């Protein structure tokens, strides 16, 4: 399995989305993909910028940009938040 299905919550626009993310990319790269996808889905409600942080909703853990998703502890079905 090369992808994980995760739920991404975006408090700034009060919406959540189910997305597949690749496990063989770094968290920072995946975060950019997520922001771009949500910006496209919402017709520009989410502005692309570098300062977004990715957190686990259940544990509050902040994921660093420089580790691979497969090494981050993110699992299939995880609930993540971008703020």
Image (spheres, rainbow, N blue to C red):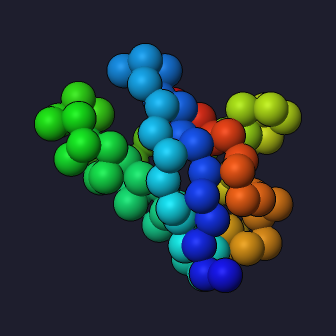
> What x and y, as percent, mark residue 27?
59, 63
The answer to whether residue 75 is left or right of residue 44 is: right
Q: Quadrant of residue 64?
A: bottom right
Residue lying at 59% horizontally and 73% vertically, measured from the top left: 3
> What x and y, as percent, mark residue 75?
76, 59
> What x and y, as percent, mark residue 39?
25, 42
Q: Which is nearer the eye, 49 or 1?
A: 1
The answer to whether residue 49 is left or right of residue 65 is: left
The answer to whether residue 17 is left or right of residue 25 is: left
Residue lying at 63% horizontally and 65% vertically, measured from the top left: 4
Residue lying at 29% horizontally and 52% vertically, measured from the top left: 36
Q: Which is nearer the eye, 23 or 68?
A: 23
> What x and y, as percent, mark residue 22?
55, 73
Q: Which is nearer the eye, 48 or 19?
A: 19
Q: Is residue 4 above or below residue 24?
A: above
Q: Is residue 32 above or below residue 12?
A: below
Residue lying at 80% horizontally and 32% vertically, measured from the top left: 58
Q: Is residue 18 above or below residue 83?
A: below
């Amino acid at each position: 399995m090369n992808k994980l299905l995760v739920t991404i919550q975006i408090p700034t626009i009060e919406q959540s989305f189910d997305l597949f993310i690749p496990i063989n990319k770094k968290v920072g790269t995946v975060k950019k993909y997520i922001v771009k996808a949500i910006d496209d889905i919402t017709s520009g409600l989410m502005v692309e910028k570098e300062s977004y942080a990715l957190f686990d909703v259940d544990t509050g853990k902040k994921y660093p940009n420089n580790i691979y998703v497969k090494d981050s502890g993110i699992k299939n079905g995880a609930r993540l938040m971008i703020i």
